[in-house]
Image (cartoon, rainbow, N blue to C red):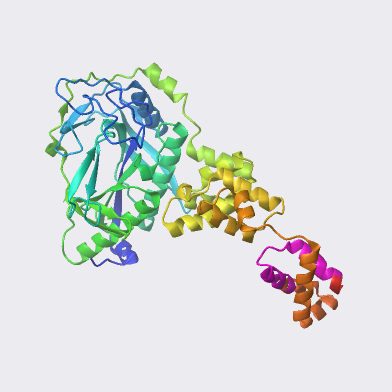
């Protein structure tokens, strides 16, 4: 598939985004029954007649899930419905044992909210159309074939442990006016939304486990047009990085389709992480295709205003306010703040500081070396393989003079390879800085003898030339020399 260069897409078209985010709530039991929601259990062990949709079984609403969704709606500046109800969304799919999903249709519990996000110093408002409750589907595993998808598979396995897990969907209104920043605005929205949900304590928001999933919609309209283009929906994108990549690809693909004179089909599309491409899924249904009707087995929900205000009082500090407070406390500049937000490292820095590291040191590692490694590995920063506590330990070894920054990078290699804690890696690999004067003096004398011209310059008073000899000693000792002591020894001999 040919793609239009990104700059050409933006010259000719204006993108419109739409993000549908599914969040699994971290309640102990499912939405309509008492089955456990624990992740990773043996297949089909957390099931019962209700979540399997067996005849005669009746659902009972999970009150904690309702409370969690209201708190989320309030945190997203939504209005909370005085009265709402569930509906049946009818469609056949093997991972829906009832052949319908209990969801909400035209009467969501939360509506008309917003979340402001910042990209490159510009604030974009993402308007929230609705936040509604529903239940998750089971999990299909396609066995055989090369892609893990149903095409080419030999057979499929069904696990209904996830069927009925409390699920919440946050649907945005069309996000306009983002221009070239559109994919990054989507990523920033997902980043801030995840931060907010984590602060609320309503979900573990683990994208790799499916507890936070994004359906990323985008359409292109000719510049100057007031009519939105035809959208595609890339389903179940499971990382922040992939949200940005998938939207970038789709904009380039749609641009090429429109430029060729063809029309964009309204359809779902699959994201292929390894190739960085999307492929067609199915034509996108309209609401009438699902034959929604009110759920007859559940009573309507009517949250009292007093209860809503009680829940409002439990909300954590708003993300923007928290960011401003933290960077003020940490003494970060605006440029450093943008760097932190760009790498998505704010929460990890906060955890590292809380565990005992200096803010500057925490930022150095998370927004620098570790962000680089996460990007190279194609994973999120909090999945890179090192914990805030280990970063604190690493920096402690540096502060104590046991290792230096260069050796610390080798220590990180060991931690990521599963060799244990930073201290254990230093011991096992023999990475401690050498400060023994005997070994250092021998290396210093060798460097002086090998570089008589540099030595003469130092004798003539040009002490800054000592840097060249220090570099020679560090190279000879594989970066494990105490650089400060090496400098002292060089100047003792030559001045």
Name the side, left or right, on which 83 lies relative to 340: left
Quarter that holds the N terminus: bottom left
Name the side, left or right, on which 477 lies relative to 44: right
Residue 446 screen position, x and y as percent: 76, 76
- Asked whether the viewer can see residue 150, the reply is yes
Quarter that holds the C terminus: bottom right
Q: Main secondary structure of the magenta part?
A: helix
Please check the rendered image and state whether residue 485 is part of the magenta-colored stretch, yes or no: yes
Picture quarter containing residue 483?
bottom right
Q: Nearer the viewer, residue 401 or 307?
A: 401
Q: Nearer the viewer, residue 408 or 118?
A: 408
Q: Nearer the viewer, residue 424 or 492?
A: 424
Q: Is residue 389 above or below residue 13?
A: above
Residue drawn 16% across the image and 39% down it? 93
Q: Is residue 372 above or below residue 322?
A: below
Please check the rendered image and state whether residue 39 is part of the magenta-colored stretch, yes or no: no
Residue drawn 21% across the image and 31% down it? 105
Q: Is residue 41 above or below residue 11?
A: above
Q: Which residues are magenta?
A: 469-492
């Amino acid at each position: 598939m040919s793609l239009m260069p990104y700059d050409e897409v933006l010259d000719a078209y204006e993108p419109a985004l739409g993000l549908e985010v599914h969040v699994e709530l971290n309640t102990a039991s499912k939405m309509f029954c008492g089955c456990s929601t624990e992740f990773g259990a043996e297949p089909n062990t957390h099931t019962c007649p209700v979540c399997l949709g067996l005849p005669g079984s009746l659902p009972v609403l999970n009150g904690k899930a309702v409370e969690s969704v209201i708190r989320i709606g309030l945190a997203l500046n939504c209005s909370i419905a005085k009265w709402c109800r569930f509906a049946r969304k009818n469609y056949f799919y093997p991972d829906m044992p009832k052949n319908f999903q209990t969801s909400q249709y035209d009467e969501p519990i939360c509506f008309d909210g917003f979340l402001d996000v910042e990209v490159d110093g510009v604030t974009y408002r993402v308007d929230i159309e609705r936040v509604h409750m529903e239940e998750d589907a089971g999990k299909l595993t396609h066995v055989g074939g090369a892609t893990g998808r149903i095409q080419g598979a030999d057979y499929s396995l069904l696990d209904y442990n996830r069927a009925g897990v409390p699920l919440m969907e946050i649907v945005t209104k069309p996000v306009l006016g983002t221009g070239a920043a559109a994919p990054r605005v989507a990523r920033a929205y997902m980043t801030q939304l995840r931060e907010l949900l984590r602060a609320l304590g309503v979900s573990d928001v683990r994208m790799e486990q499916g507890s936070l999933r994004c359906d990323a919609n985008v359409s292109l309209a000719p510049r100057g047009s007031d009519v939105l283009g035809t959208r595609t929906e890339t389903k179940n994108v499971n990382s922040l990085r992939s949200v940005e990549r998938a939207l970038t690809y789709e904009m380039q693909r749609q641009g090429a389709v429109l430029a060729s004179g063809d029309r964009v089909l309204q359809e779902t599309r699959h994201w292929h992480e390894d190739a960085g491409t999307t492929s067609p899924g199915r034509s996108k249904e309209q609401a009438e295709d699902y034959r929604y009707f009110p759920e007859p087995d559940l009573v309507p929900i009517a949250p009292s205003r007093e209860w809503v205000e009680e829940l409002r009082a439990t909300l954590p500090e708003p993300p923007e306010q928290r960011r401003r407070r933290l960077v003020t406390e940490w003494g970060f500049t605006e440029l450093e703040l943008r760097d932190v937000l760009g790498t998505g490292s704010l929460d990890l820095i906060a955890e590292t500081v809380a565990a005992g590291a200096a803010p500057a040191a925490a930022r150095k590692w998370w927004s620098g070396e570790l962000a680089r490694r996460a990007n190279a590995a194609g994973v999120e920063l909090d999945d890179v393989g090192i914990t805030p506590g280990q970063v604190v330990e690493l920096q402690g070894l540096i502060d104590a003079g046991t290792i230096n920054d260069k050796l610390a990078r080798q220590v990180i290699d060991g931690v990521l390879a599963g060799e244990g804690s930073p201290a254990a890696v230093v011991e096992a690999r023999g990475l401690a800085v050498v400060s023994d004067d005997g070994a250092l003096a021998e290396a210093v004398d060798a460097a002086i003898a090998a570089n008589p011209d540099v030595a003469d310059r130092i004798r003539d008073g040009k002490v800054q030339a000592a840097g060249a000899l220090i570099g020679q000693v560090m190279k000879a000792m594989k970066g494990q020399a105490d650089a400060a002591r090496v400098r002292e020894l060089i100047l003792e001999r030559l001045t």
